[in-house]
Image: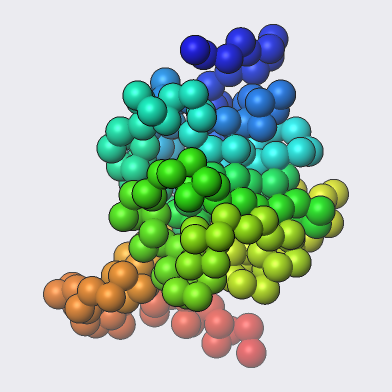
């Protein structure tokens, strides 16, 4: 049975501003849960951002100051949790733009994997994380297990999946779940710092290196185009232009 939605709450929305696109989860009264019907909405948002010129970053965040997200709607796990959710997260992991997860609060269940799909995860003090799959008798899907091991290492992945322990914000930073930890009022500014830094980088090189870094982390052999991408950048007019500009500043 679907939970009732309060006025002003509903599916995720997309906000476009300057060089960054923000996907915002909008069910704060329900810890910004992700409903099965949200999946095609999120897919459409990703497609729209990819088609926009000038975008340098995709930010995923929640509404309110309690939870980033509690993950997939619990009542729908038994009959509506199919490959579409896993495929969505794989698409976010492989998204060509750099992705930032701005964790405005605590994160639970499948939303922890949503965060791990992102290139950078910025959390706020006072938050926590919890992966309850084992308590539900749920064997987690392979992509999520892989992301945990790659990001946190085998020991911490086992700790979180096999014991379902809750970690506080400082521990989330220590084990590598968070890239940075800030005061709640500093979250927006910190995200802005990342976007500003990305705007100064050449987007083609960023996209290419992100793709190669993800392949290395997944244990894949270097892609055939890895050397080609490097050598092409050496010959590029953009490299010449930026190096010349740097020399003029000396």
Question: Depth check: 230 or 13 in front?
Answer: 13
Total numbered labels placed on residues in the image:
0
Q: Residue at x 30, y 33 (%)?
A: 82
Quarter location, residue 32: top right
Question: Depth check: 125 or 145 in front?
Answer: 145
Q: Is residue 69 above or below residue 189?
A: above
Question: Depth check: 6 or 22 in front?
Answer: 6
Q: Residue at x 75, y 33 (%)?
A: 64
Farthest left residue?
A: 224
Q: Is residue 153 above or below residue 2?
A: below
Q: How is the image coloured?
A: rainbow
Residue 85 horizontal/vertical position (percent): 36, 37
Question: Depth check: 135 or 132 in front?
Answer: 135
Residue 250 appears in view: yes
Residue 36 horizontal/vertical position (percent): 42, 25
Q: Residue at x 48, y 67 (%)?
A: 158
146 relative to 235 in the view: left or right: right
Residue 214 horizontal/vertical position (percent): 35, 67
Q: Quadrant of the C terminus?
A: bottom right
Residue 205 appears in view: no
Q: Residue at x 49, y 58 (%)?
A: 161
Q: Is residue 73 above or below residue 91?
A: above
Residue 196 horizontal/vertical position (percent): 63, 59
């Amino acid at each position: 049975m679907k939970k009732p939605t309060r006025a002003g709450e509903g599916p995720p929305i997309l906000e476009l501003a300057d060089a960054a696109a923000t996907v915002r989860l909008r069910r704060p009264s329900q810890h910004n849960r992700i409903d099965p019907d949200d999946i095609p909405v999120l897919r459409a948002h990703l497609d729209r951002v990819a088609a926009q010129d000038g975008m340098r970053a995709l930010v995923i965040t929640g509404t309110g100051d309690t939870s980033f997200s509690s993950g997939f709607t619990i009542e729908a796990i038994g009959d509506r949790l199919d490959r579409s959710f896993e495929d969505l997260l794989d698409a976010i992991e492989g998204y060509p733009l750099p992705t930032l997860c701005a964790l405005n609060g605590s994160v639970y269940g499948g939303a922890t994997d949503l965060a791990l799909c992102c290139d950078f995860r910025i959390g706020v003090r006072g938050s926590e994380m919890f992966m309850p799959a084992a308590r539900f008798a749920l064997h987690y899907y392979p992509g999520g297990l892989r992301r945990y091991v790659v990001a946190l290492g085998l020991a911490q992945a086992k700790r979180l999946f096999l014991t379902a322990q809750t970690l506080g914000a400082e521990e989330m930073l220590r084990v590598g779940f968070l890239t940075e930890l800030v005061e709640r009022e500093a979250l927006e500014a910190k995200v802005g710092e990342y976007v500003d830094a990305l705007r100064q980088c050449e987007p083609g090189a960023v996209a290419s290196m992100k793709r190669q870094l993800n392949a290395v982390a997944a244990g894949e052999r270097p892609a055939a185009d890895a050397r080609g991408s490097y050598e092409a950048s050496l010959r590029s007019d953009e490299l010449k232009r930026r190096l010349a500009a740097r020399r003029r500043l000396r």
